[in-house]
Amino acid sequence: MRTDVTTRTGAVVLTALAMVGVGAHAGAPAHVTSLGVAGRSNATPWVAGEGSLVAVAWGASVEGKTDVFVAVSHDSGQTFGAPVQVNTIPGEARLGGELPPRVAVTPGRGSSHPEIVVLWTARGATTAIRTARSRDGGRTFEPPVALQAPDAVGDRGWPSLALDSHGTAHAIWLDHRGLASSKAAGTSRDHRSGAAHDGVAMAQKSGLYYASGTKNPGAERELAKGVCYCCKTALAAGADQTVYAAWRHVYPGNIRDIAFTFSRDGGRSFAGPIRVSEDTWAINGCPDDGPAIAVDPKGQVHLAWPTVVGGPNPEGALFYASTRDGRTFTPRTRIPTLGSARPTHPQIVVGGGGRIVIAWDEALNGQRVAAAREIRPQSGPRAEFGPVIELSPGEPATYPVLAATGSGLVAIWTTGGDASVIKARALSLP
């Protein structure tokens, strides 16, 4: 392996040329690029693509403080420029595997530069959901804008971001202000109070919130109550002003299944939530593992999510389903993974030609492994699957994310550990 290191304004870009295989069932050698900020642990990546431009956002931490950085590639993820810090309050970012910063890209309006929007959760007296926009291809960012109301109390996070064809930013997040209000009024009791913990009642104090806007976001509003509070949300924008959202919901009996809603008018109104699949996963707590969503050029919505399959020996599993009308989903199809007891953290993307690809990670032989494979929906109720592509054979990889580019797909993941870095590679489908 040959590694070239370039240091600019305190940040470091690593370009690694490596011959990397892609699993037992498919592949050719892959070019892997590493991203990081010098002297920090780099993790929680997200990625977006537009033509040959790829933008990766992540958190870089040192001494318990985290900042949000973005690096941009103009050659479909082969090489990246120097990371640019997005947040203006040093160390404010509150990030994790299920609440990474989000990034989205749209063609520039009246400019040759694509616009890049970044969203993250910020620490403070209360937590905040912030966005910042770049109109020059990621070289500089406008001052951050808070999406929640200035007087919003309590905790919030697990946000998602999507840009529509007009460049309007749409965001959802999980919001705990109802619990904060009940605590202030002395009416809240939790599992530490000695009383039986009622997960359904507790979830009614948390909601799914939505806001939209460009430079000046529209007023936030609650779309649903009863959310499972620490699983990531998922958001996508389609053609004709459609917006689609998915999250883990708490149903009677502490069932933690996936819910879905959509807007046909650019977020001005949303349909009532529906249940994607009756998985009946009962757990008195949050699984910390949410859904992923993508929309194809024909407007079909594709959803992937983790759950637990019951029976004498319960085990974790990933499932796939799709919808054409936003009201009914196909029966769930189990996604074949690598054989561990709990595959996790699914992500899904629609690439060129409408090809659907899912990525995930799981623990094998004491090491996290990230993998991907194509999903091939059939005319019947089931789907077929392409060969498994292991993203980083022989090396730890976790929390993979995917984006479509003009020439294919790019996969991003983190190595984990105290000296974690972000890795990127092109993904070629068999």
Image: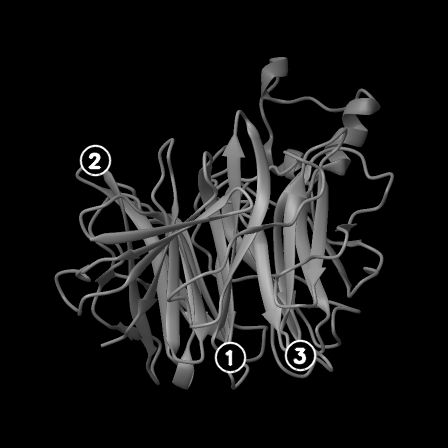
Q: Is residue 236 visible?
A: no
Q: Position of residue 204 (x, y in %)?
A: 69, 40
Where 231 sits versus 132, above or below? above
Assign a secondary structure to mark 2. Answer: loop
Q: Nearer the viewer, mark 2 or mark 1?
A: 2
Identify the amino acid type marked 2.
Gly
- Residue under pointer 3: 165
Measured in 3D between alpha carbons, the distance from the residue under mark 2 to the one under mark 1, in whole angstroms, is 38 Å
| Residue at the image point whose x is 48% and y is 43% from the top | 37
Identify the amino acid type marked 1.
Gln
Measured in 3D between alpha carbons, the distance from the residue under mark 3 to the one under mark 1, in whole angstroms, is 17 Å
Please report whichever mark, 3 or 1, sits nearer to the chain's N-terminal start. 3
Q: Position of residue 196 (x, y in %)?
A: 58, 21
Mark 3: few, some, or many residues within 10 Å (few <14, many ≥20)? few
Q: Is residue 372 visible?
A: yes
- Residue under pointer 2: 366
Q: How is the image coloured?
A: one colour
| Residue at the image point whose x is 65% and y is 53% from the top | 119
Mark 1: few, some, or many residues within 10 Å (few <14, many ≥20)? some
Measured in 3D between alpha carbons, the distance from the residue under mark 2 to the one under mark 3, in whole angstroms, is 43 Å
- Residue under pointer 1: 300
Q: Position of residue 38 (x, y in %)?
A: 46, 39
| Residue at the image point whose x is 46% and y is 56% from the top | 278
- Front in this rendered view, residue 208 or 95: 95
Question: Do the residues bearing badges 2 and 3 touch, measured as CB atoms within 8 Å?
Answer: no
Report whether 65 appears left or right of 51: right
